[in-house]
Amino acid sequence: MLSYIPSPSHADGSAFNGFSIAGLHFNFYGLIIAIGVVVAVWLAQRRWRALGGFAGTITPIALWAVVFGLVGARLYSDVTSWQVNTQGDWVRAFEIWQGGLGIWGGVAGGVLGGWIQARRMHLPLPPLLDMVAPALPLAQAIGRWGNYFNQELFGLPSKLPWAVRITDQGQLASIYPARYRPHMADGRYLPGTFQPTFLYECIWDLLTFGALLLIERKLRLRRGYLFAAYATLYTFGRFWTEYLRIDPAHRYLGLRLNDWTSIAVFLAAATILVWKGRPRLRPTSGQDADEDLVGEPLPAGVLALERARAEAQNPRLQSSEDDLTGGSGGSHPDGPDGSFSPPPDGAGEGGTRGTEVVSGSP
């Protein structure tokens, strides 16, 4: 019975991180990242439809967000880990399939790309931020398994039964501080077992995903601030997993650069969430002011845009609606292709927060 998690490896111990078909090489890291992106877009589409939006709206926004996110993630990683990423060869700065994507640059770039496309589509950013907030940690949880195939993102040496066994000579040689490297025999490092920080972060990401759905159901937040809750929760867990890691990194005052980034983002996000995220009270009555809250149907103006977008994509929706309402335009047909989802009663007028709206269920 194994007392550790084995890593995929070749006979010589190098990481088994891909395969070739007809001369084309497929890297597990890139494939797993792609799966995470697809799952995130799928979830975002379901959540957008549940608020009354047109599912097709998300695709162009996602394309911009993914492209900008990849560029931002690689730029952040290259700037903070140039030598590790390139080994002195600048061409390797572009080899994202080998690993080396910084989440901070990825999120910042993704939000920027999504915002640019949203503006082009005349959509407000806050409901889009709420829509994507739970999708991000779910994608991150999936993506961390790409690090497993690369035999990276491990922590301090450990004999725990869930410790991960590292055999790749390049990864073992890069351990810092050097005192944590395994002993050598015949000019090679012996395999060692280490804290599986990739697994810890995967678990934390899944907990963050569940917590965000719960917050959306149970707490009253202003629209757009569920994203601040994501940043607060994620960075709290990321600090501890980052603290355990022993791969090369810039250190300041005893902490890794990403630890300091986690602290800064956590403090900023938590402050914004507490200071601005709660609904404002009416001065006279002490009750919540009339404003959009997380999980409520989209505002009437956005619903009108989404309805027009859906009808432009599928003219049959308009003719079907006219048949049903005698041309009054009073219903929101929702075909089996899911091209447009009807908002709950009161949409755009402070409608109730139904469970199906909060959770993103159709």
Image: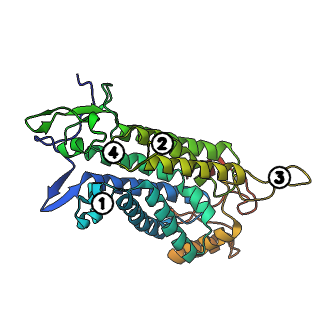
Q: Earlier in the sequence, mark 4 or mark 1?
A: 1
Residue 281's label in the rendered image is 3
Q: Nearer the viewer, residue 181 or 49?
A: 181
Question: Separation of disc 4 and disc 1 at Cα?
Answer: 15 Å
Q: Secondary structure at mark 3?
A: loop
Q: Secondary structure at mark 4?
A: helix
Q: Amino acid at mark 4?
A: Trp
Q: Amino acid at mark 1?
A: Ile
Q: Earlier in the sequence, mark 1 or mark 3?
A: 1
Quarter of the picture containing the N terminus is top left
Q: Earlier in the sequence, mark 4 or mark 2?
A: 4
Q: Secondary structure at mark 2?
A: helix
Q: Position of residue 237 (x, y in %)?
A: 49, 41
From the viewer's perspective, tell me whether residue 54 is left or right of residue 146. Answer: right
Q: Earlier in the sequence, mark 3 or mark 4?
A: 4
Q: Residues within 10 Å of mark 1 (few under 14, many from 20)?
A: some
Residue 125's label in the rendered image is none
